[in-house]
Image (cartoon, grey):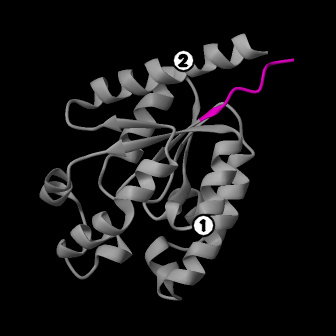
Amino acid sequence: MRDKVKNIVLIGMPGCGKTTIGKMAASVLNKKFIDMDEYIENKYKITIPEIFKRGEEYFRNIESLAAVEVSNEYDVVISTGGGVIKNEKNIINLKKNGIVFFIDRPLENIIADVDIKNRPLLKNGTHEIEKIFNERYDSYKSYCDFLVDNTSDYEVVIDNIISIYNKELNIQKDEC
């Protein structure tokens, strides 16, 4: 029987690179990739912006259900939505089978290239990003197992994540 290998869970601001980094890391590691927003859209057959029309609380409840479901997976890379940290239970669930990485990207880099048209919480303009950044940054830092800077090429970020992840898996094996 194959060991149940922990997931890589990516948290961070909208526009920090979670999805791109997650897909690339999953490819390098030959793991399944789960984008929680896509997971929600596929399961409920509705887009995230359409869900938000029913209210943020409605979306957060669905997001929490999705966090429980994806956290039951093993050996996958999970890219979360930026607000997953708004409910501590989401992080508790994701940490059961996962190692949580905060993709820390400078605010000015996010503002320079974030596409706001499909991001409901940013629909009022990029000035909202600063407000969200200030509200969430400390939570990202406190909930993560590891902080990884996204200030260079994606390959460097992915190498850092994989290096940390492999060290953690070896530590877990040694503890058994």
Q: Amino acid at mark 1?
A: Glu
How many neighbours does mark 1 have within 10 angstroms: few (below 14), some (14-19), or many (20 or more)?
A: many
Return the x and y of residue 93 as percentages of the image width and height.
69, 52
Q: Is residue 14 left or right of residue 124?
A: right
Asked whether 40 or 57 is in front, the reply is: 57
Residue drawn at point x = 55 percent, y = 55 percent: 36
Vertical relation: 4 (above or below) 34: above
Assign a secondary structure to mark 2: helix
Residue drawn at point x = 87 percent, y = 17 percent: 1
Vertical relation: 51 (above or below) 74: below
Residue stretch in magenta: 1-7
* Residue 22 part of the magenta segment: no
How many neighbours does mark 2 have within 10 angstroms: few (below 14), some (14-19), or many (20 or more)?
A: few
Instruction: Look at mark 2 in the image and give the residue it sits on.
Output: 166
Q: Is residue 115 left or right of residue 160?
A: left
Asked whether 33 or 69 is in front, the reply is: 69
Q: Amino acid at mark 2?
A: Asn
Q: Earlier in the sequence, mark 1 or mark 2?
A: 1
Place residue 110 in its image quadrant.
bottom left
Instruction: Look at mark 1 in the image and give the residue it sits on.
Output: 63
Q: Residue furthest bottom?
A: 54
Return the x and y of residue 102 as percentages of the image width and height.
42, 44
Residue drawn at point x = 64 percent, y = 75 percent: 61
Q: Are marks 1 and 2 in contact (CB under 8 Å)?
A: no
Q: Nearer the viewer, mark 1 or mark 2?
A: 2
